[in-house]
Amino acid sequence: MKVLGIETSCDETGIAIYDSNDGLLAHELYSQVKLHADYGGVVPELASRDHVRKIVPLVQRTLATAKLSKDDIDGIAYTRGPGLIGALLVGSSMARALAYAWDKPSVGVHHMEGHLLAPMLDTPSPDYPFVALLVSGGHSMLVDVLGIGQYSVLGESVDDAAGEAFDKTAKLLGLDYPGGPLLAKLAENGETGHYKFPRPMTDRPGLDFSFSGLKTFAANTIRACDCGEQTKANIALAFEEAIVDTLLIKCRRALKQTGHKTLVMAGGVAANRRLRVNFEAASKQDGFAVFYPSFEYCTDNGAMIAYAGCQRLLAGERTELGEKAMPRWPLDSLSPIF
Ligand code: KG4
Ligand code: ZN
């Protein structure tokens, strides 16, 4: 089955074609990062309008890259939620219009399910069950994954998401939006031992996160110093170490609690190199397997939506053309597929 996947939940227009036999056939991505950079964050109305401009040419280009026509497509998957409502409406309207015009089945995919299944695009891929750490600009979650659609949220952020904390702290350090990757780059020049940031909520039981205090700690640290480039790099490193350490402590706890031996990391922050290096080391030390998507499938993309949608379409799931986009949509309300 060949599935056209459409992702427009935030500031990336992602289109892909996934084949259940041959894997990913083509994927295209247009990032609106430059459009929003001047505003220091995503401006929802601008995001929606830009998706409208880019989506049709991207669908055409993806079909051309895969050397396929509409007649070769067996189904259409689109991000139904969660996300910015205007942005979701562009992708879901496009998907439903194509499904109607081409007379193909369509299915609405949960954006976070897309992220947590993204490692399935690579080989080797993880076996179920596993613990998933989903860390993006909008979410930080630990999920017990027994199979597709069989998710229990073990813990989540009570305030800022991990990516949001990266972006806000980067802004305090004078970096552009989105600051996560830029802060990570700055941290490469940092020296350890100058600053010690807290590891929030690790001194009490439970699997929830809280990252807004780290941003405040960074703000106070920056205010208290006459920050040259080296000092900024030292602060960036201390901040990054604190986030990575905190995530690792909670992941170890989640693995212990569930008894699972596999950890899957996904979402934009899973592209962070320090996170990967430290988690690799911990996996060797503790004897668990760790998987993460290749860098291009960590951040938002159409491939993960095409993959997840393909699994659901193969299982016979359909979303009626009249169904609405869902800006809020709890991950553990999804139906399992067997
Ligand atoms: O998954 P994603 O593309 O979009 C959402 O669904 O939110 O994640 C974007 C987030 C941003 O906050 C960005 O700063 C962060 O992922 N990010 C990183 C890195 N690459 C992207 N954070 C830390 N280190 C990175 N290398
Ligand atoms: Zn995302």
Image (cartoon, rainbow, N blue to C red):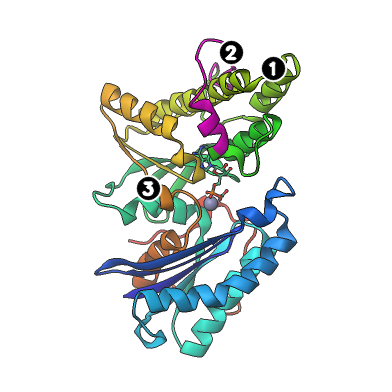
Amino acid type at circle 3 is Pro
Work out whether 192 lies above or below 171.
above
Residue carrying label 2: 195
Left/right placement of residue 52 relative to residue 202 reads: right
Q: Are the residues flagged by discs 3 and 1 in contact, CB closer than 8 Å?
A: no
Work out whether 328 lies above or below 48.
above
Q: Residue at x 32, y 25 (%)?
A: 281
- How far across and down, in percent of the image, does residue 150 sit? 41, 52
Q: Quarter containing ligand 1?
A: top right
Q: CA distance from mark 3 to mark 1?
A: 34 Å
Most foreground residue, 212 or 321: 212
Q: Residue at x 73, y 49 (%)?
A: 38
What number is the disc on residue 102?
A: none
Most foreground residue, 325 or 101: 101
Is 190 in the magenta? Answer: yes
Q: Quadrant of residue 199?
A: top right
Quadrant occupied by the C terminus: bottom left
- How far across and down, in percent of the image, does residue 289 sit? 28, 35
Quadrant occupied by the N terminus: bottom left
Report if residue 165 is visible in the image.
yes
The magenta-colored residue range is 182-203
Left/right placement of residue 180 relative to residue 275 reads: right
Circle 3 residues within 10 Å: few <14, some 14–19, many ≥20: many
What number is the disc on residue 293?
A: 3
- How far across and down, in percent of the image, does residue 208 sit? 56, 31
